[in-house]
């Protein structure tokens, strides 16, 4: 009998990750660093340890005495809002191994934790469902296919670059989930397979955040936590953005052209995956749009433009973005005159299409709960710090980048990673003899590289949007990861010479 292996679904992959994390809490000793936080109302630092909590007047001397290389002004200006780890304070604590009940509770807690993202995704689904009902999407895709005939590759360059700009400036990441229903039909109509739109959107976002030039959620928070000005070291990040984006676009276009020329070269050839956007891809080319279609498409595009402006300029987050798509769905329904019952029906059907994606987002958060409640996150960080301490600068940075690469499996939040690791890792900079800004760049490159594949990040929800298997994505992405890893090493070494 022939044995055939079928790669598990994203839900199973994440549950395996939760179980492995729980097993780690039995194998690794529990431990924690003392933490320091700032209370702006009393102008005091609060130092928390396993045995006591202490409040003391906030002065620069307190920071210096605790080997924290951060200016007091950063705390007073509100740039350091979360509790930071204090270097040299790690100690083992009572073990808290996570058992069967904790494994069962983890995805449920994760769904509670991610409810803002989940609701955002469901409302986007409803919005797309209402819009698809108008037929404007079919007509718009047909019009675009007609205009781009023979020049489809230009779309890859433009969209990847724009999304990368969003990633490098304001951390465009979760918001990209809204782009799949728009762009998948366009790329399929151009003759590409489902991997191409995923690559354009996800790789664009990932290379942008990997080379976060001014991203406040990673670069600025990490720089503040490392005690350096965020503008120092920007040349390395600009180099990564430009060179990395060129490599990514070349890689995507190479694959896209191969698939367009010979569909049997597609990594999806022969698979029976159902395209979740089938109903909007069966379209014919057209050279003219109806009046109502122009209005609906304009409203559709305006909704996303307002979202990007709101996030990047007005400081919007999931509550505002969710409300925006809900209001836009209602306006589209009014313009279509579909009636209240039909509106509800199409909205619910659209939301239902993205329910699986929503569960994946929530379950992924469960991994963090297991690690934190088992108190081994700080233990992993402590071992990682010991691994790189005392290395020559030329070896230290590449190895540290790989440490951040692995740590991202356990801490997928960029801001969370920054406040936890930067005070500790930056304290190694003068000991090892590397500029502290290069520690920040190492964190960005290592974490960014893992973001292309980490199951606890956004890749599984993104793949679920288009029904592409994770193992297929790994086959597609690993050569690009190798190229970007080598490029990262070269840029980090270059930073030591400047």
Image (spheres, rainbow, N blue to C red):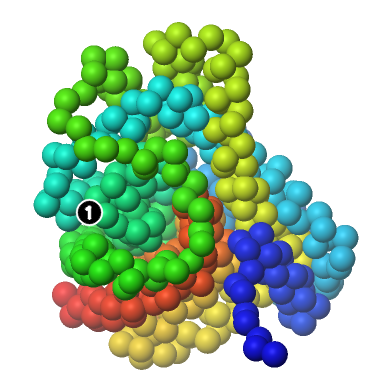
Asked if residue 317 lies left or right of residue 1, the reply is left
Total marks in image: 1
Q: Position of residue 261 (x, y in %)?
A: 21, 66
Q: Out of 375 and 445, give the one closest to the viewer.
A: 445
Q: Residue 341: percent from the left, percent from the top?
A: 61, 13
User: Is 205 above or below relative to 143?
Assistant: below
Pointer 1: what residue? 156
Task: Quadrant for the N terminus, please.
Answer: bottom right
Residue at position x 58%, y 48% from top?
A: 357
Task: State the image quarter where residue 52 is shown.
Answer: bottom right
Q: Residues within 10 Å of mark 1 (few under 14, many from 20)?
A: many
Q: Is residue 410 left or right of residue 158?
A: right
Place of residue 264 in the rendered image (x, y in percent of width and height, measured from the top left) = 33, 71
Q: Is residue 41 left or right of residue 474?
A: right
Give coordinates of residue 277: x percent, y percent.
45, 43
Residue drawn 39% across the image and 77% down it: 478
Going 56% across and 69% down the picture, which residue do you hit?
Answer: 409
Figure quadrant of residue 295: top left
For residue 265, what is the image quadrant? bottom left
Q: Could you tell me which secondary element the residue under label 1 belongs to?
A: helix
Q: Nearer the viewer, residue 469 or 396?
A: 469
Position of residue 163 relative to residue 308, above or below, is below
Instruction: Residue at 57%, 10% (x, y): give it.
Output: 340
The answer to whether residue 12 is visible is yes
Q: Nearer the viewer, residue 326 or 169?
A: 326
Quadrant (top left/top right/bottom left/bottom right) for the C terminus: bottom left
């Amino acid at each position: 009998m022939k044995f055939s292996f079928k790669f598990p679904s994203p839900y199973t992959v994440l549950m395996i990750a939760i179980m492995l994390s729980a097993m780690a809490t039995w194998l690794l000793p529990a431990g924690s660093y003392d933490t320091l936080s700032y209370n702006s109302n009393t102008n005091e630092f609060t130092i928390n340890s396993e045995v006591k909590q202490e409040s003391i007047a906030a002065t620069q001397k307190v920071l210096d005495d605790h080997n924290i290389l951060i200016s007091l002004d950063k705390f007073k200006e509100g740039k350091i809002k979360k509790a930071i780890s204090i270097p040299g304070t790690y100690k083992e604590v009572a073990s808290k191994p996570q058992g069967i009940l904790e494994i069962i509770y983890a995805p449920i807690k994760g769904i509670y934790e991610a409810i803002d993202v989940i609701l955002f995704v469901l409302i986007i689904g409803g919005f797309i469902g209402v819009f698809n009902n108008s037929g404007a999407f079919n007509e718009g895709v047909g019009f675009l296919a007609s205009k781009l005939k023979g020049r489809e590759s230009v779309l890859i360059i433009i969209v990847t670059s724009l999304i990368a700009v969003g990633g490098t400036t304001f951390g465009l990441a979760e918001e990209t989930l809204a782009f799949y229903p728009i762009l998948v039909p366009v790329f399929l109509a151009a003759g590409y397979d489902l991997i191409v739109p995923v690559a354009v959107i996800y790789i664009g976002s990932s290379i942008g955040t990997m080379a976060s030039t001014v991203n406040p959620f990673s670069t600025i928070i990490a720089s503040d936590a490392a005690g350096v000005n965020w503008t120092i070291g920007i040349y390395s990040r600009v180099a990564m953005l430009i060179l990395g984006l060129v490599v990514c676009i070349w890689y995507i276009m190479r694959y896209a052209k191969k698939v367009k020329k010979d569909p049997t070269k597609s990594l999806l050839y022969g698979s029976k995956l159902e395209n979740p956007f089938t109903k909007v891809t069966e379209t014919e080319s057209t050279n003219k749009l109806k009046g109502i279609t122009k209005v609906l498409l304009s409203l559709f595009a305006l909704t996303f433009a307002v979202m990007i402006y709101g996030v990047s300029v007005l400081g919007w987050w999931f509550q505002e973005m969710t409300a925006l798509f809900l209001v836009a769905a209602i306006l589209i329904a009014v313009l279509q005159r579909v009636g209240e019952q039909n509106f509800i029906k199409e909205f619910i059907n659209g939301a239902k299409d993205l329910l699986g994606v929503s569960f994946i987002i929530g379950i992924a958060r469960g991994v963090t709960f297991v690690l934190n409640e088992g108190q081994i996150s700080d233990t992993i960080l402590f071992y990682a710090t010991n691994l790189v301490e005392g290395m020559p600068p030329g070896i230290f940075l590449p190895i540290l980048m790989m440490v951040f690469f692995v740590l991202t499996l356990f801490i997928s939040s960029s801001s969370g990673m920054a406040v936890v690791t930067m005070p500790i890792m930056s304290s190694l900079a003068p000991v090892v003899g590397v500029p502290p800004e290069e520690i920040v760049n190492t964190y960005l490159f290592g974490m960014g590289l893992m973001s292309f594949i980490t199951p606890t990040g956004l890749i599984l929800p993104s793949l679920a949007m288009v029904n592409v298997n994770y193992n297929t994505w790994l086959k597609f992405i690993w050569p690009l990861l190798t190229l970007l890893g080598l490029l990262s090493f070269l840029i980090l070494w270059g930073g030591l010479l400047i």
